[in-house]
């Protein structure tokens, strides 16, 4: 079973669909272990917290691309993430 991270930026409707799918037992190949948001105010963070999923905020504003990516990579490694889903993630 793969450890999954979902990267989000906003309300998290795509994330909620993934959470619901996981709760239904239909997600056999992995488990959502982490939600990373580019915005500290994203409602997706609340959805993740309500589902008991760890969260992390990695803001891009005022930082270099390298710093932003390094923070995301650090969070992924610390949580043993093997698969990433971009679900409305608005930062590249």
Image (cartoon, rainbow, N blue to C red):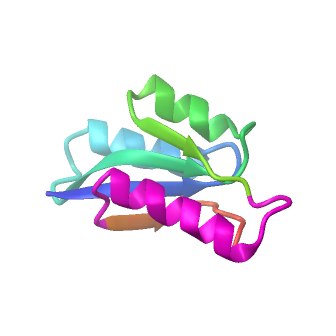
The spot of residue 66 in percent (x, y) is: 66, 75
- Residue found farthest to the right: 62
Question: Which quarter shows the C terminus?
Answer: bottom right
Task: Specify whether 88 is left or right of 22.
Answer: right
Question: Which quarter shows the N terminus?
Answer: bottom left
Q: Nearer the viewer, residue 65 or 38?
A: 65
The spot of residue 58 in percent (x, y) is: 64, 52
The spot of residue 49 in percent (x, y) is: 49, 27
Quarter of the figure with residue 85: bottom left
Residue 6 in sight: yes
- Residue found farthest to the top: 50
Task: Specify whether 45 is left or right of 28.
Answer: right
* Residue 70 falls within the magenta-colored stretch: yes
Q: Residue at x 56, y 67 (%)?
A: 70
Residue 86 in sight: no
Magenta segment: 60-82
Q: Nearer the viewer, residue 60 or 17?
A: 60
Residue 92's place in the image compared with 84, above or below, is below
Q: Nearer the viewer, residue 14 or 7?
A: 7
Q: Residue at x 83, y 58 (%)?
A: 61
* Residue 43 falls within the magenta-colored stretch: no
Quarter of the figure with residue 53: top left
Task: Specify whether 68 is left or right of 19.
Answer: right
Q: Residue at x 42, y 36 (%)?
A: 54
């Amino acid at each position: 079973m793969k450890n999954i991270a979902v990267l989000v930026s906003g309300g998290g409707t795509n994330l909620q669909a993934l959470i619901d799918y996981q709760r239904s037992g239909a997600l056999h190949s992995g488990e959502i272990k982490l939600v990373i948001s580019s915005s500290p105010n994203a409602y997706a963070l609340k959805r993740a917290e309500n589902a008991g999923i760890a969260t992390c905020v990695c803001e891009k504003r005022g930082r270099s691309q390298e710093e932003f990516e390094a923070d995301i990579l650090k969070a992924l490694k610390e949580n043993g993430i093997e698969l990433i889903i971009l679900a409305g993630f608005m930062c590249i």
